[in-house]
Amino acid sequence: VCFENRPGRDCVLFTPCGHSFCKECVGAFFKEKLRSQKVSPLTCLAENCESSAQQSVIIELLGQKEFDRYEEILLKKAIERMDDMVTCPRISCQKPSIRSRT
């Protein structure tokens, strides 16, 4: 994080915490989290702060295509935590399904 003084239009304000960081640093941080698939969810850069980034901010910084990928990763991680959910093994499907208990 650069910690430079920047005009407000060049910064991201997280709510409700009120922390502010430059868009360039937040974007780089989010892109690295996405690359490493550690995205559950994208939060403020301040130490020990858990304020989630707003959807509009994530889309602005990552772009729609990467935001869609972000949501896919979140869904996949949520499904992995559910004991009764699996992903369809067919390559053409890959949708979540409830595991049958037979």
Image: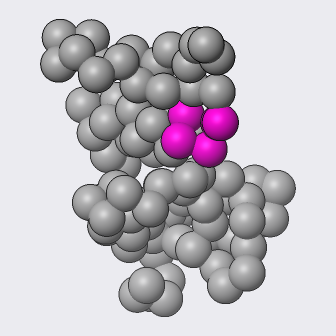
User: Which residue appears at 24% of the width and 31% of the height?
Assistant: 65
Say which of 42 and 9 sits in front. Answer: 42
Asked whether residue 11 appears in the rendered view, the answer is yes
Where, by quadrant of the figure, is residue 100 drawn? top right
Q: What type of secondary structure mainly makes up the magenta span?
A: loop
| Coloration mode | one colour
Residue 57 to residue 92: above or below: below
In the image, farthest residue toward the front: 102
Quarter the C terminus occupies: top right
Say whether residue 29 is magenta. Answer: no
Furthest residue in direction left, as rendered: 91
Which quadrant would residue 47 be assigned to in this image?
bottom right
Task: Please provide percent x and percent y for residue 5.
Answer: 49, 83
Residue range highlighted in magenta: 79-83
- Furthest residue toward right: 16
Where's residue 55, x and y in %?
A: 55, 36
Give x and y (percent) for residue 74.
50, 40
Above or below residue 63? Residue 18 is below
Q: Residue at x 58, y 52 (%)?
A: 41
Instruction: Tell whether 102 sits left or right of 62.
Output: right
- Residue shown at the point (55%, 34%) measured from the top left: 79
On the picture, is 9 further left or further right than 88? right
| Residue under the point 32% across and 46% down | 62
- Tell me residue 66's x, y (percent): 28, 39
